[in-house]
Image: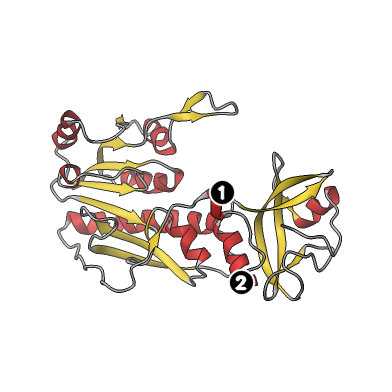
Amino acid sequence: MSLRIIFMGTPEFSVPTLRLLVDAGHRIVAVYTQPPRPGGRRGLDLQKSPVHQAAELLGLPVFTPVNFKDPEERERFRAFNADVGVVVAYGLLLPEAILNGTRDGCYNGHASLLPRWRGAAPIQRAIMAGDAKTGMMVMKMDKGLDTGAVAQTREVEIGPNMTAGELHDRLMLVGAKAMAEAMVKLEINDLPLTPQPEDGVLYAAKIDKAETRIDFSRDARDVHNHIRGLAPFPGAWFELEIGGKPERVKVLASELAEGQGADGKLLTDDLVVACASGAVRLTRLQKAGGKPLAAADFLRGTPLAAGTRLT
């Protein structure tokens, strides 16, 4: 036996789940993803999403509606007569007509330990808050924002220097396996659902560009968590005067270090920076338009002596 599944996802994070469901023998009757967006070096070419590209390679039918307001679009969804919808980072809010448009509803793979970090940026917010663990949850979707009952939970430890990019890649694979296991249980009608607790709700707001600048007047641990929570994208940054003009430098990795001094002051020649309390060592950096570089390589091209102020 196998399930008739409608898959809904957009970024690379969603692709392993789609592939694993295909490998498990389920019939993917439709793949929904975000429409092609401008991209390429000049931003002029329309680029298909990673899910779109993967689905085409797998020979699956792809649909890219802007939304589901059109009654005809909703009817097309229902007409697939699917057993279940699987949603992983799709990027659209689904109306009740879609949530109820399959026999068993829709199940979402969400990258947090709900109800902590509901919303758009759970991976980044978990690291920025200094959480020691997070995970993937398979949740039966309802009309609320990540409020549905939980079917599967897989916990993942967050290492002290782990970046959002590294955690993303780990959860991407953990989530795929959790969803595949959930579909096996759903197929044999053995997938229990547990309502989320009312306590401990936190919302993971979308990352705003205004919060990406590094504030060295914070505690070193907060600065470190801020850096790794935004790495590699959009990237936490500071300004440095290079060639007589301020230039933005992204920090893609850091570690806690010993030292004390004025906020933002380099304490050593190898990029140990003082914070309000303690210090951080910047270990991977990227100048605007440049490549990511290890600290030693960055310093060969941009020597910075102790006493330099980063703002």
Mark 2 → mark 1, Cα distance in angstroms: 20 Å
The residue drawn where x is 16% and y is 57% is 188
The residue drawn where x is 67% and y is 67% is 255
The three-letter amino acid code for the residue at tag 1 is Pro
Q: Which residue is mark 1?
A: 234
Viewer-proximal residue among 293 and 273: 273
The residue drawn where x is 54% and y is 27% is 43
The three-letter amino acid code for the residue at tag 2 is Arg
Sequence order check, earlier mark of 2 and 1? 2
Can you give x and y, in whole percent of width and height, for residue 194 in the image? Answer: 21, 68
Can you give x and y, in whole percent of width and height, for residue 104 in the image? Answer: 15, 51
Can you give x and y, in whole percent of width and height, for residue 70 in the image? Answer: 20, 31
Q: Which residue is mark 2?
A: 221
> Can you say whether 129 is above or below 99 in the image?
below
220 lies left or right of 6: right
Give the label on residue 254, or none.
none
The answer to whether residue 153 is visible is yes
> Can you say whether 5 is above or below 294 in the image?
above
The answer to whether residue 170 is visible is no
Viewer-proximal residue among 182 and 217: 217
